[in-house]
Amino acid sequence: MLRELLSLFRSDTPLAAMGQNFAQMLAVAHDMTLKAGEIYFSAEPAAPDERTQIYKSDVQVNKLQRTIRKQVIAHLSLGKDPPSLPYCLLLMSLVKDVERMGDYAKNLSEVRELHPAPLPDDQILAELQEIRRGVETAFSASATVFETSDQERAMMLIRQGRDLTHRCDALVERVARSSYGARSATAVVLGARFYKRIGAHVLNVLSSVVMPLHKLDYYDERYLGTDEDDS
């Protein structure tokens, strides 16, 4: 189904404009995530204009979401292209995921207000840096994987992404057992949770490449090449 959707995105149909807006929305949210990571891990507090730019980008993501929703509703109201209904449903689901990525990136950029000093320079933060790189890599690849409907790479990234979510949970447990003060513990736990949520929504976009519409956001183990079952 995704290949058919992509062909419509590249056509002269109304869905093409929706596809362009979705691509732009994904790109803006990705840029927000990269900038938020720089602010979060920086040794110095963010400059006011850096935070302002993230807030402006969040507004842009929200406007694009509303635009796409309006386009979908207008397209379906005409009732001239019933076969496009599944694609419209898919797009409505995906734009919500991208909107949430933008929100969590904004939240991540705000954490340093709670902890203006540099974050602890230890193994816990090194692990969080690795998680950050994994999430950013998957996010960077998601647009190309979606555009090319690359199922093999999507499944690889989904497996890696699921591992990152487990690592985020384990990291929170490590912080709970650490000697961190309240500010450091709060900042690192929030960082881990926000990266987990951004990564989870990236996985939802990737799932559209390999899963049927009714299982969007779920990762059927039979598609991922394991022996577990999913009903």
Image (cartoon, rainbow, N blue to C red):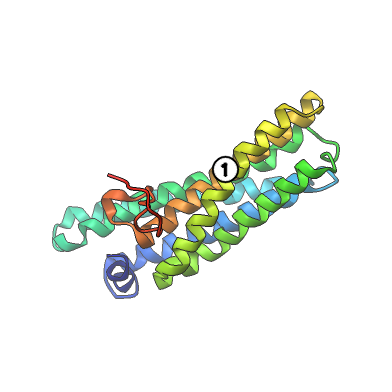
Spot the residue most to the front.
227
Spot the residue most to the top.
182
Write down the residue under mark 1.
Answer: 166
Left or right of residue 59, residue 92 in this image: left
Left or right of residue 32, residue 162 in this image: left
Q: Quadrant of the N terminus?
A: bottom left
In this view, the residue in front, 231 or 118, is 231
Q: Please report the residue visible at 40 percent of the width from the left and 58 percent of the height from the top.
A: 224
Say above or below: 229 vs 184: below
Q: Is residue 59 visible?
A: no
Q: Please report the residue visible at 74 percent of the width from the left and 27 percent of the height from the top.
A: 177
Residue 150 drawn at (x, y percent): 42, 70
At label 1, which amino acid type do we have?
Answer: His
Rate crowding at label 1 as few (under 14), some (14 to 19) or many (20 or more) other CA atoms within 10 Å.
Answer: few
Label 1 SS: helix
Q: Quadrant of the C terminus?
A: top left
In this view, the residue in front, 214 or 68, is 214
Q: Please report the residue visible at 75 percent of the width from the left and 37 percent of the height from the top.
A: 112
Residue 37 drawn at (x, y percent): 70, 50
Q: Is residue 133 visible?
A: yes
In this view, the residue in front, 105 or 192, is 192
Residue 129 drawn at (x, y percent): 72, 50
Res 125 → quadrant: top right
